[in-house]
Amino acid sequence: MENTLFDYSPIVGREPISWPGGARVAFYVGLNVEHFTIDRPSTSINEATAALVPDPLNYGWRDYGPRVAIWRVMEVLDRHGIRASVLLNADVCEQYPQIIEAGNNRGWVWLAHGKNNSTLQADVDDERAYLTEVVDTIRKATGRRPRGWLGPALTETFQTPSLLAELGLSYVLDWTNDDQPYRLNVPGMLSVPYSLELNDLGIFTMHGRSGGDFVQMVKDQFDQLYAESADSGRVMALALHPFVIGQAFRAKYLDQALEYIAGHPGVWLTTSDEIAEHYASTVTGTPA
């Protein structure tokens, strides 16, 4: 079947993007703050026990995130003046309210990320009711309706963007196919860049790279986008999971990577909300 959700648009033929203050790269941290149920298999570091209920090995690894690691990650982000764009499971609001309070105190923005990370969007029966519950739960807990969406494991149905637009959201991160925002063929909906490659879960657990490798990958990604942004702005997303990057032996590498980016001129340290809002209000979407 043909893809009707968005059109093909080569990056070389677009209207130039100008970021606030003349910045060349808009940088944001997509921080996955998630809840995993104890009775369903999910993201695992060791597949040998992943089907067990309970599965202390893998569940404990994931649960290290909200208990310990996120507080370590907060300190690193604070050090560089970076507000997280939080991909928030609605269940976090009830399970870990202290995280919501700490994030609000820091001016973090909250994107809807499903109910929990043990339930994929494709598995939902009544999607409209499900999304309504997710959005309303986050709104009540954080004091603000989310503007963006990332599906658990980047999952959507063909109806998800339209349903999200009905609920007042304005962008999704699931389609990781660009270095700039673009408009979907759904009125009022954008796609904002996110990253599968520059993502700690893949870098460390799927590819087995080291902390030093992570820092070099962040530097290389930034340097290339910065060079390409001379004529039109780019977006750099860094996707993080506290139970991965927040391990004690990895935290210093996140600190080094952020220091490199934050220390450059011409960088807009921002949030995915602000990127979407700026793009929607300044770019027509017509070819240059």
Image: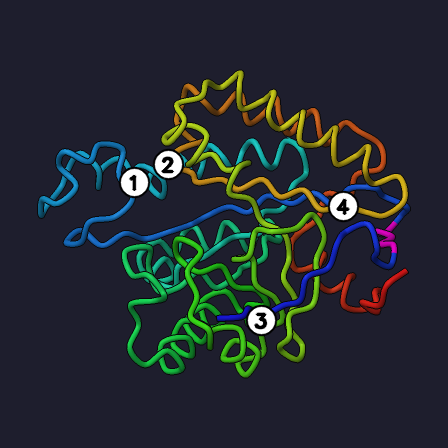
Task: Mark 4 vs mark 1: give the one in front.
Answer: 4
Q: Residue furthest front?
A: 1
**Label for residue 62?**
1
Q: Quadrant of the C terminus?
A: bottom right
Q: Nearer the viewer, residue 200 or 140?
A: 200
Q: Which residue is mark 2?
A: 243
Are the residues at dot 2 and dot 1 in contact (C-beta closer than 8 Å)?
Answer: yes
Q: Nearer the viewer, mark 2 or mark 3?
A: 3
Q: CA distance from mark 2 to mark 3?
A: 33 Å
Return the residue at label 4: 234
Which secondary structure, mark 3? loop
Question: In the image, is 191 to the left or to the right of 197?
Answer: right
Q: Earlier in the sequence, mark 2 or mark 1?
A: 1
Residue 63 relative to residue 134: left or right:
left
Q: Could you tell which of marks 1 and 3 lies nearer the N-terminus?
A: 3
Tell me where residue 87 appears, x and y as whole percent: 48, 54
Which one is nearer the viewer's eye here, 30 or 139?
A: 30
Query: How far apart, in angstroms, are the residues tagged by discs 3 and 4?
Result: 22 Å
- From which residue to which does the magenta span run? 16-20
Name the one closer to the observer, 45 or 186: 186
Kindly state the secondary structure of the residue where label 1 is placed.
helix
Label 2 SS: helix
Q: CA distance from mark 2 to mark 1?
A: 6 Å
Which is closer to the viewer, label 1 or label 3? 3
Q: CA distance from mark 1 to mark 3?
A: 33 Å
Which residue in the protein does label 3 denote?
A: 5
Q: In front: 77, or 46?
A: 46
Is label 1 in contact with label 3 (beta carbons under 8 Å)?
Answer: no
Element type at mark 4: strand
